[in-house]
Image (cartoon, rainbow, N blue to C red):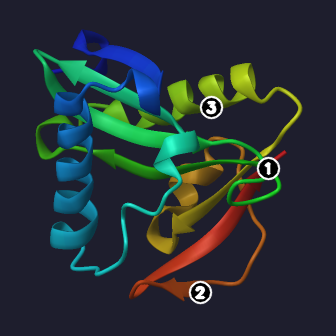
Amino acid sequence: MTHNTMQWQALRFDQLTTSLLYQILKIRQEVFAVEQNSVYLDVDGRDLDALHVLAMRDHELMAYCRVLPPGLKYPEASIGRVLTTAPARGSGAGRALMDYALTVSTQHYPDSGVRISAQLYLEEFYSSFGFTSCSEPYDEDGILHIEMLKP
């Protein structure tokens, strides 16, 4: 499977079907709570204002993140909840997801940079997209993170 066989889209909350919303929340819980053994409030109220960026293959969610508008979490736009499902890992889907999310962010918030809270072990990955570290590492839900900014 390659990321080219997936259908990419960015949807507002009110454009998500209940079935798709269920898939999103399920996979976020599987990846962030179960796989990473992290207890935190995933449904944080920000989904309502987010653009939900996703890749589907045969009606199955393969990659996901959300783009938050400037002023909701940070002064800049923000990309978070970045994930690929187990079947999509190693296919380039994560890189394609970030490329697409950055394009979506630029289209919707052209006058804003992008700030992220990145898991520390992914600092090099995000640096390859032009993000630079702008904080010391900090613990977030039991996992070391670092703030990164792409002007």
Q: Give the structural element (helix, strand or loop) at label 1.
A: loop
Q: Quadrant for residue 29, please give it.
A: bottom left
Question: What is the CA distance from the residue labelled 1 to the residue labelled 2?
Answer: 20 Å
Q: Amino acid at mark 2?
A: Tyr
Q: Amino acid at mark 1?
A: Glu
Vertical position of residue 28 compared to residue 105: above or below = below
Q: Position of residue 42 (x, y in %)?
A: 36, 64
Question: What is the CA distance from the residue labelled 3 to the residue labelled 1?
Answer: 13 Å
Q: Are marks 3 and 1 in contact (CB under 8 Å)?
A: no
Q: Residues within 10 Å of mark 2 (few under 14, many from 20)?
A: some
Q: Quadrant of the C terminus?
A: top right
Disc 1 or 2, which lies upstream in sequence? 1
Pair 1/2: label in front: 1
Q: Position of residue 106 (x, y in %)?
A: 73, 26
12 or 97, nearer to the observer: 12
Q: Viewed as shown, does residue 73 lie left or right of 151?
A: left
Pair 3/1: label in front: 1
Vertical position of residue 88 compared to residue 144: above or below = above
Residue with the mark numbered 1? 76
Q: Position of residue 79 (x, y in %)?
A: 58, 47
3 or 110, nearer to the observer: 110
Residue with the mark numbered 2? 138
Q: Residues within 10 Å of mark 1 (few under 14, many from 20)?
A: many
For the point 62% across and 84% down, which residue is it? 137
Residue with the mark numbered 3? 102
Disc 3 or 1, which lies upstream in sequence? 1
Q: Amino acid at mark 3?
A: Leu
Q: Are marks 1 and 2 in contact (CB under 8 Å)?
A: no
